[in-house]
Image: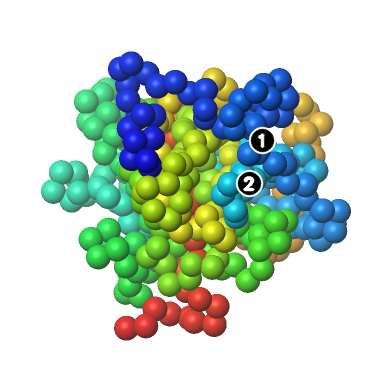
């Protein structure tokens, strides 16, 4: 049943019927209670105590709105699955898009680019080479470079052949992404989570990701955090076997999906990446919000200020600097999924 649903939402001609795809924006409007999925969606309210404890941390974490503005949902038939509907600010979205393209795409992080097919310049700095080709009018190579980049790995690098992690394949995990995960952990009550590995996926419109489970980690009790930016996607979440019918959910730019508890080892997939009907990374914010955001960055404590690339955070507000990132994200989706590899108390993978 999972494969049938995947093929249903993947097909292009004729396009699929999307009325059964869970859309929390429609749930919020409370206008279509007749939808089959409406009773499965339940709002999750962040407690007053959680808000008080994490307010300072979230104010310091890059690009997040205050918790009282978050819209958080769970699905009653998928325990442990949470969807937070775009808790990011405009500058926050731009920052993470730029980080994913400019920084996370180059060494020491590992990408799928083939040394036989691409030049050393492309392998050492894919984003800069893409810009060089675009500026030089080499449209063919620019298009080839853009489509070729499908993923990079951060921290512990997943071995796609053996499906296991290796202590020898390991780089330092980005401190700003670690700080972002910490902000969500504090707010949602996940204790002792240590972000140790991430996969950054680059999806052009029209691509997909087949059904799978994330079971390579030695720690299956820790949650998995998935951050979406750019174009929209349909996300399928099923059960522990392919015989169970999955639920389909819209994921839009800025959405955060958390897979914990029973949902952590469930089959999931992305059968469809499609053009979004909104660009929250380009919505002009009020001067009051922009001023507040600047104050928050200025008030960061020393540790978090070191985690944040404050220069990049300021640069993405400049439209000329932002333009190449904007051109890329208008045709693609970036997904950053973060997980803990080791059980608590273990400091390296056994050899």
x, y percent for residue 121: 25, 46
Q: What residue sits 86% from the left and 53% below the top?
A: 48
**Pointer 1 residue:** 39
Instruction: Compute the Cα span from label 2 to label 1.
Output: 8 Å
In the rendered view, tell whether residue 312 sits above or below residue 288: below
- Is residue 268 in view from this perspective? no
Q: Is residue 289 above or below residue 350?
A: above
Are dots 2 and 1 in contact, CB under 8 Å? yes
The 10 Å Cα crowd at callout 2, few under 14, some 14 to 19, many 20 or more, is few
Name the residue furthest left.
116
Give the residue pinned by disc 2. 76
Of the 4 image quadrants, the one containing the N terminus is: top left
> Which residue is at the front of the view, 153 or 26?
26
SS of the residue at dot 2? loop
Residue 271: image location, x then y, percent: 38, 35
Residue 351 lies, in percent from the top left, at 32, 83
- Residue located 57% across and 22% down the image: 278
Report the residue that reaches farthest toward the top.
14
């Amino acid at each position: 049943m999972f494969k049938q649903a995947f093929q249903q939402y993947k097909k292009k001609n004729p396009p699929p019927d999307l009325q059964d795809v869970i859309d929390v924006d429609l749930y919020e409007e409370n206008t279509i209670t007749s939808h089959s999925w409406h009773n499965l969606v339940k709002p999750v309210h962040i407690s007053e105590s959680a808000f008080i404890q994490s307010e300072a941390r979230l104010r310091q974490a890059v690009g997040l709105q205050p918790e009282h503005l978050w819209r958080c949902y769970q699905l009653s038939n998928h325990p442990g699955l949470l969807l937070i509907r775009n808790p990011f600010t405009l500058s926050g979205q731009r920052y993470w898009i730029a980080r994913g393209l400019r920084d996370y795409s180059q060494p020491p992080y590992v990408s799928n680019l083939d040394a036989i097919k691409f030049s050393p310049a492309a392998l050492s700095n894919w984003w800069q080479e893409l810009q060089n080709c675009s500026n030089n009018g080499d449209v063919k190579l620019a298009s080839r470079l853009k489509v070729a980049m499908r993923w990079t790995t951060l921290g512990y690098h997943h071995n796609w052949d053996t499906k296991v992690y290796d202590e020898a394949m390991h780089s330092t995990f980005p401190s700003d992404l670690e700080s972002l995960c910490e902000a969500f952990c504090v707010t949602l009550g996940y204790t002792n989570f240590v972000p140790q590995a991430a996969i950054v996926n680059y999806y052009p419109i029209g691509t997909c990701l087949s059904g799978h489970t994330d079971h390579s980690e030695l720690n299956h009790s820790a949650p998995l955090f998935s951050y979406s930016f750019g174009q929209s996607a349909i996300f399928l979440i099923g059960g522990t076997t392919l015989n169970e019918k999955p639920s389909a959910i819209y994921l839009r730019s800025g959405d955060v999906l958390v897979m914990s508890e029973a949902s952590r080892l469930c089959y999931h997939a992305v059968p469809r990446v499609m053009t979004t009907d909104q660009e929250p990374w380009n919505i002009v914010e009020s001067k009051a919000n922009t001023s507040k955001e600047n104050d928050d960055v200025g008030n960061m404590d020393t540790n978090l200020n070191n985690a944040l690339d404050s220069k990049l955070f300021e640069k993405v507000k400049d439209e000329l600097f932002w333009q190449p990132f904007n051109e890329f994200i208008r045709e693609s989706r970036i997904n950053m999924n973060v997980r803990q590899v080791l059980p608590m108390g273990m400091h390296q993978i056994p050899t």
